[in-house]
Image (tube, rainbow, N blue to C red):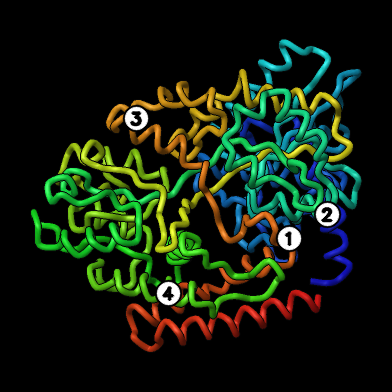
Amino acid sequence: MSKKLILIITVVAIFSLFAMPAAAQSPTCADEYTVQAADWLSKLSDRYFGSIYAYPAIVDATNLMAQSDDTFTKIVNPDEIEVGQKLCIPDKAVAEDYLNPKVGDKQLVEFWTTDNEAERVAVYEAVAQKYMAANPNVEVRIIPIEEGGISQRMTIAVAANRTPDIVRMGIERVAAFSADGILDEDAAEAVINSIGMDDFRTGPLNMVVDPATGKHAAVPYDGWIQAIWYRQDEFNKLGLDAPTSWDSIKAACEAIPGNDGFLYGITLGTDPAQNYDQQVFEQFAISNNAWPFDENGNVTFNTPEMIETLRYYASLQDCATPGPQYWRGAREAYEYDQAAMLFYSTYIMDDLVDGSGLEGGGKVELPTPDLAARTGFAPLIEGPSGNKASYGQLVTLGILKGADPAAQDVVKFFLTEGYQDVLGLAPFGKVPVLKSAVDGWKNSSEYFANYDPTTLEQIANGYDSMQRWLFRPDYDATERAVIGDIEGRLLVPQVISAITLEGSMTPEEGAAFLQDQVEQLLAERQAQ
């Protein structure tokens, strides 16, 4: 692609950041077009609409159609469309709305959300409508965006001086946006205080603190918790303690195989091509105070704590499901009563009632119909030195600098009057960060009735100790970028596989390999 073409597309991409007009929300096509060689979106926009700048209308219309018609393919990167790909060309009036958005005399609040499926966007818009009914001087525009492209879109928005007012984003984005100076931390502080800081879980609040200012850079919103899901009935029968520590996990893993048809104690992440391995390993590592960097920014993969964690993880494989395993195998081994423990997020809750979807189609037929009721939930792991850790994901609402003053009130509304509506979209993966919202959340899904009330309470409390390498507050943007590189290059899964399955590395050799690789990554990042 020529530099001129890249420049055209980049300039045009600025316009994709603007609010999606209401007319574009319904997936209708004035025409359908099949991509030919030498096509690009701005060229097609000029052909159909007389302007290269209306190409986001094609992107959004195509993506909306792709949600209900599999002959369309979602456009994730506007720079990349494939020959033969079918596009939805909307009516010219829709394109005009992109070029000339109108709000009259109202205050406009643009709200980017990564909850971008059609049914989820509809709920966000319904909440926005409730707010606008009570505040007729404000127009709230919900703009669905792709999670993977949020950083790129924000960079372009900043360059065009057209940033949104509010953005829903994972916690991993907060540090970078805060370091770029584009988040209004005073606005986030104001929202948190207006709701009541005591109502927020401590863990989520700590995770959004900007270490440079001591202020909250964004407002915590929802998230999910990882835990060991285990056969509590079998643990009780064998007199085993809940798997909440290194010792109790190892004891249960060794005791269960051979009892009541169970073949294995646990399923671990051991597939070198899957980050599930790191997701599981990282929780053990943090519980042993093993981190990728120390407080001075030195790489610390060859510490005694990291080596000890690698050795312990490998020892569990002696009583674990064999072969390369990742989340799918772990889930199915548990559902089929083959293994009595697995690591999984709260998204598994409906699967333990209905059976999960199989890769080849259909669902797992659960041999234990009341599996959910027999399942315990252990989010915390205590390491040998007494450190405790849980793992999960936090989603936040960020308020951008220069946002309309009404943005603070809109964020508060989405955390109060509209909160249960949003949580109800996916109750298993949207655990509330507000203590006052827990009771309503517990009643948001019929599946929750299959679980012991204690389990729901443990899930709600899971944020209090949630940590991840990426979210350590004192890590700077470079260190967090390196952690992203570690995940992207699957370094930890490769080492785990080499130690646990292949036997080609010892824990000491694995730690040394990681130390060398991460030092190189850090040097590369620092040289940029």
- Horizontal side of 371 relative to 315 (left or right) equals left
Q: Which residue is mark 3?
A: 448
Asked if disc 1 and disc 4 are in contact, CB closer than 8 Å, the reply is no
Look at mark 2 in the image and give the residue it sits on: 180
Q: Residue shown at 59%/75% (left/top)? A: 300
Q: Quadrant of residue 9?
A: bottom right
Residue 23 in sight in this render = no
- Give the residue displayed 87% in from the left and 59% down from the top: 8
Q: Are marks 3 and 2 in contact (CB under 8 Å)?
A: no
| Label 2 – label 4 distance at C-alpha | 37 Å
- Left or right side of 309 for 355: left
Instruction: Find residue 128 and report its horizontal and vertical position in percent.
Output: 68, 22
For mark 3, give the secondary structure. helix
Q: Is residue 524 visible?
A: yes
Q: Earlier in the sequence, mark 2 or mark 4?
A: 2
Secondary structure under tag 1 reads loop
Q: CA distance from mark 3 to mark 1?
A: 43 Å
Q: In the rendered structure, which disc, 3 or 1, sits on the residue that comes first in sequence?
A: 1
User: Alpha carbon of mark 3 to alpha carbon of mark 2: how far?
Assistant: 41 Å
Quadrant of the image containing the N terminus: bottom right
Separation of marks 1 and 4 at Cα, in angstroms: 46 Å
Label 4 belongs to which residue?
A: 308
CA neighbours of label 4 inside 10 A, class few (<14), some (14 to 19), many (20+):
some
Which residue corresponds to mark 1? 79
Q: Nearest the camera: 469 or 420?
A: 469
**Viewer-nearest of labels 2 and 1?**
2
